[in-house]
Amino acid sequence: MKFISIFLGILILASYGWTQDSPQPQFDQPVDAAKYIIRPGDELSVIFLKANIEPLKLTVDPEGRIIHENLGMITLSHLTLEQARQILRQALKELYKVEQISVSIIKPREVRISIMGAIKSPGMYTGFSSERISQLIKEAGGILEDGSSRTIKFSGGPEEIRVDLDLAVFTGDINSDPCLYSGYTLYVPRKLSQRVQVTGEVNSPREIELIDGDDLERLIALAGGLRSWADSSNIYLLRSGQKLTENISEIKAGDIIIVPSLELPDTFRQLVAFGAVNNPGRYSFDKAGSLKDLISLAGGFKKTASKERTTLFRLALTDEKGRISPKRFSISNAFGASENESNFSLLPGDSIFVPYFVGYVEVSGNVPNPGTFTFLKGKDSKYYISLAGGFLPGSDEAMIEIFHPASKITSTHSTAVHINDGSRIIVNLLKEEN
């Protein structure tokens, strides 16, 4: 249970002289003021713009009130941050005669969330307001096999929010995995009976719950997207045993979406670029012999691209029986950082994935305060580990592991290694020598 682990964490931190000035978890995205619920313990920063007035720090007491010697007593309990801003701005304008006033949340704080339904360990859990639903569900043991990952209900805020973890995982829609500040109660229902299957040349063939708004493009994305040798022009449906090749955008419950394969010899003469490039798609190998050439053909990087995490995937030329194999593997995680890397030679069948910039680094393992922290270019692992409270006793302080989300590869490095945007740093225990 999370409240037990937090209690033990507090004991550990106390033994190391933890103070309120120690590094705190951070928000990985801007706070949505229309969904953020004011709770006891929240600290609000008030800044008077274009006025020679000292900023204020207001703390919400256990009864949901702000008590200030000049403002008096203002009740903000259960209001959203946007509603609280309106009330405070009106009161502050009248008191200080200032028109432009900024009111913001200073830092994340602990919240208690009730988790019910098809979850392995339902109950009351404590987390930080900067954490997301998926992290809390993991603490609760995960969703049961017959539980829904697409119709989770998060309530207690200004409106009930539907959480769709499939969208968050497979399409990167972070709003489908909201922060804990948006509600109080999480309910995981049973899986919907309306489902479809996506099979063939997709990266994660599987059965998917069918909800309003799902179309062919989204369902393929929820199956991990097309493989580089998929024949996207000849996708068809099986409906009640009948093969449908027309109007396949009208998906119904029970349909099976089949993605056929291109002929492998043709695939070997193609390259694929996808992710944060301006023109993702397939390109002739004859026109792009290097990584730099392929990125140029794909229209260059988008402004929101995380160039340093560009990942190259390569098809295995033969399988264990000497036949052409459709399997692929990652051979790199950091191209584009220099001219030499940009000119890396490609082979027919290669594909590159350019991740979007996410703006944070995750630290996990043997540290007091694991979590996500704002990415700063050029910082090494020691910087982010210090934000997570430093090494706990028994840690390997010389070597750390880095998990690369794009390639799903974990590699070992010295702690002096520079960290790329979106990476996960894992601090392990020092292995004892026999």
Image: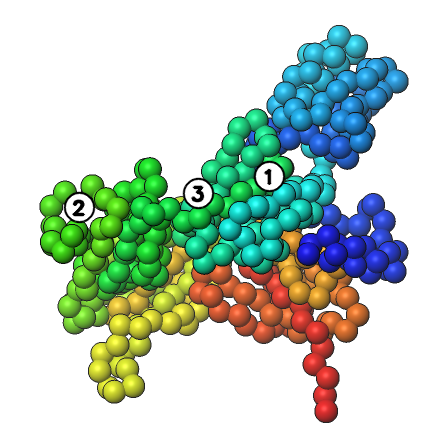
**Residue 145 located left or right of residue 249:** right
Q: Nearer the viewer, mark 3 or mark 2?
A: 3
Residue 15, percent from left and from top: 88, 60
Q: Quick one: quadrant of the N terminus?
A: bottom right
Query: Gap between marks 3 and 1, in whole Å?
Result: 14 Å
At horizontal 65% and vertical 24% (from top left) the residue drawn is 79
**Residue 96 located left or right of residue 371:** right
What's the residue type where badge 3 is placed? Thr
**Residue 127 located left or right of residue 118:** right
Classify 10 Å Cα crowding around label 2: few (below 14), some (14-19), many (20 and above). Answer: some
Residue behind mark 2: 248
Q: Secondary structure at mark 2?
A: loop
CB atoms of marks 3 and 2 within 8 Å: no
**Residue 26 located left or right of residue 56:** left
Residue behind mark 3: 151
Disc nearer the start of the sequence (3/2): 3
Q: Is residue 147 visible?
A: yes
Q: Quick one: quadrant of the C terminus?
A: bottom right
Q: Secondary structure at mark 1?
A: strand
Residue 181, percent from left and from top: 63, 37
Tell me which colouring the rendered structure shows.
rainbow
What's the residue type where badge 1 is placed? Thr
Q: Secondary structure at mark 3?
A: loop
Residue behind mark 1: 185
Disc nearer the start of the sequence (3/1): 3
